Image (spheres, rainbow, N blue to C red):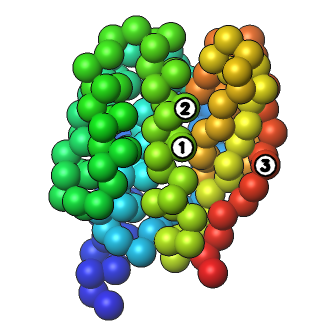
Amino acid sequence: SNAFYAQHDHSKMDMSNENKGMTMHHDKNEVKLNDENLTKAYMHYTMINKALVAADAKKVQMSSKMLVGILNSYGKAQEAKKVASELASNSTIKAQRVLFSNLTTAFEPLLKGNIVEGEIYKTFCPMANSGEGSYWFSNSSNIVNPYMDKAMASCGSVKETFKSM
């Protein structure tokens, strides 16, 4: 369908590609979900993830605000929207990282079984959030940890891979 290709082009032009940063070149895997707003929502989830990797609290808030807007359009993900709102209004990285763990939990049912293209890796770090351990989703099996500081950026392992059915 034309809508599908239009969406495809849109994601190619997206601004987030400009600031992927050096470590992100392995991110070739493009993920599409069965709903355009859901695909955009996941894209913003990954932007929040990257902002946390860079410990950029302002960018986390900005991307979270945008995520809230997209989830409003999607209309079905109340829990994810609630956490995204909390992220948008929270300006400390430590608190944002705890909330991101909750966002990941809220995102799982939105992703599982809804992928039409690409793969999403469910990754776990046992040391995240004061040793409680936290998950995150990534387009890459390469570990870039959003919870730990740069020195621990590769801490974590892929626990599950979601792909199209």
Q: Name the quarter where the C terminus is drawn.
A: bottom right
Residue extending farthest to the bottom is 1
Does residue 18 show up?
Answer: no
Report the side of 50 relative to 3 (left or right). Answer: right
- Mark 3 and mark 2 lie on one chain; the one further toward the N terminus is 2
| Crowd around label 1: few <14 · some 14–19 · many ≥20 (10 Å) | some
- Say which residue appears at 46% left-offset and 60% top-offset: 110
Q: CA distance from mark 1 to mark 3?
A: 14 Å
Q: Give how far across and how far down residue 37 sits, in percent.
A: 29, 62
Secondary structure of the residue carrying tag 3 is: strand
- What residue is shown with label 1? 105
What is the number of the mark on residue 101? 2
Q: Give how far across and how far down residue 122 sits, in percent.
A: 68, 49
- Check if mark 1's residue and mark 2's residue have beta carbons within 8 Å: yes
- What residue is shown with label 3? 159
Secondary structure of the residue carrying tag 1 is: helix
Does residue 76 show up?
Answer: yes
Amino acid tagged 2: Ser
Task: Relative to 73, say whether 131 is above or below.
Answer: above
Report the side of 1 relative to 105 (left or right). Answer: left
Nearer-the-camera pick, 163 or 133: 133
Task: Relative to 64, say whether 141 is above or below.
Answer: below
Amino acid tagged 1: Thr
| Crowd around label 3: few <14 · some 14–19 · many ≥20 (10 Å) | few
